[in-house]
Amino acid sequence: MGQDDMASNQSAAQVSHVPSHDAKITAVHQHDIEIVDWNGPNDPENPFNWSKPRKLLITILCLTATMTCTMNGTALTVAWKDTNEHFGISDEHFPNSYWPVASWTIGGAVFMMVFLPLMEDFSVRWGYLASYVMFLLFVFPQALVQNFAGFIVIRFFAGGFVSLVANCIVGICCDIWEGERGRSVPVASYITVYLSGSSLGPVMGAAVLTTLHWKWIIWIQLIFYTSLLPLFILLLPETRGSNILRARARSLRRNDPTRTFSTTEDLDRSSPLDTLRTSLSRPFHLFFTEWVVFSFTIWSSFAVGLVYLFTQSTEQVFSHLYGWTSIQAGLIQSAIVLGMCLAWIANFYQINLYFASAARNSESPGDPIPEAHLYHSILGCFLGCGGGMFLYAWSSTPSVPWPVPALGLLLVGYGINAIVIAVAAYVTACYSKYAVSAVASVCAGENLFAALLPLAASTMYSKLGFGWASTLLGLFSVVLGGAPVVMLFWGRQIRTRSPFISEARYGEGREGSCEGLVGRE
């Protein structure tokens, strides 16, 4: 029996015992339209009411997919010599070997801005499965294409569909975990595995390259991705409440064509053209007019750019200082991942600090203070990114054993994750109903920095030297850390002067969610 048929049988039975004017249970009249709603707060079809084991299974499955899919973006970086030889390109005058990663991240930025808002009209389940299948279709040609330009185009589309898959996944987490506290750990976990996947890509590639041809990096990924597909088909249900209600309304209309059933979301839905226009224009407007969006976009984007920069710079440093191969240098990326995992653990304490701030909030009594999201990120910025980069910079000499610069990488990984988690949470808390556009600006910046910052790594480390190049990056980290410090001391005044934040918080009210992370508005 299909989902619609099941919904038809259940909802029809519920509605048949409810007067059409009763708004409390399932359907209400709005003029001549009957609005379909949940059958009370304990409706078993409401994803918030699903059992905790079921939610955990779905979440773990989705997080696994996120990590493995993002590894596709960087796994080939350790095989740059082989790919250069295969495609007949050289890094002598320009780091052409990084273009496969740059095109992958640019594809993610473009697809997220253009296609993600349009997916709102589709089922989360089918939108995710379609994006995942399309991603698979752009993985296997990466091992077959003989032309470098064609390879770059294929990578562009692969990265684009990964961005859709990843955003669907964080949307699923938001759909099944209720409330700001309930969603805080799943969303922080999503960000952690997303970033970790990018750093684990070279580790996976290095492990394969030790014994196999470089194309097996792609084939092994494809085998694993394909093996996950049946699990998604069997275990991933529709999770978005509005789509489940839409299926109910559709079934009710089939059973009784004389009555008009709809959902609140369908009545308020914008046209695809209006949605696209807003998704493309408002993020740029917020970036250039809102201090919070501008400063936090630059801050978070630089942090994410460091993740991808290290896929290039670590080989330069460790091969020159310690005579390591590109494979060994790829394995050192695991130090960054370990730091990210430590930041994820520390974030549990940050979550408690955030919700404890509600007791002293005089601006909106009972609600947590938005700036309380930033405590951990300030530590991560100055001690993690700043301190880690300085340690990495001035321990990069042959006389210092390799675990010391590796410790610097660990600290940087800690700082990166703390920053990105805080930025996503803070921007969402501040901008509420405009969070989609605000976070879209942040995510677009992150993808662009991931594409462009590493292109400068080779030249910067060659001309400035290992110590001064990393020192310069550390100084940038410290300077950008001024943004959360400013908000910590003057955040309330800055938010009060922002027309977008004022309307979102006072005109519409605040409702803790992570909708901004998944392109909803």
Image: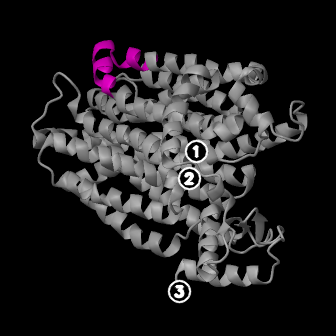
Verify CB contact (< 8 Å) between mark 1 and mark 3.
no
Q: Is residue 231 visible?
A: yes
Q: Is residue 505 left or right of residue 403?
A: right
Q: Which residue is mark 1?
A: 517
Q: Amino acid at mark 3?
A: Met
Q: Amino acid at mark 1?
A: Leu
Q: Which residue is mark 3?
A: 1
Name the quadrant containing residue 377. Answer: top right
**Cα distance, mark 1 to mark 3?**
34 Å
Name the quarter where the C terminus is drawn: top right
Q: Is residue 152 left or right of residue 257?
A: left
Identify which residue is drawn at 67% across, 74% down. Answer: 259
Above or below 328: residue 402: above
Name the quadrant containing residue 314. Answer: top left
The colouring scheme, among rainbow, by chain, secondary structure or one colour, is: one colour
The mark that comes first in sequence, 2 or 3, is 3
**Cα distance, mark 2 to mark 3?**
29 Å
State the SS at label 2.
Answer: helix
| Neighbourhood count class around disc 3 (C-alpha, 10 Å): few under 14, some 14–19, many 20 upward | few
Of labels 1 and 3, the one closer to you: 3
| Residue 521: in magenta span | no
Q: Which residue is mark 2?
A: 170
Residue 456 percent location from the top left of the image:
32, 22
| Neighbourhood count class around disc 1 (C-alpha, 10 Å): few under 14, some 14–19, many 20 upward | many
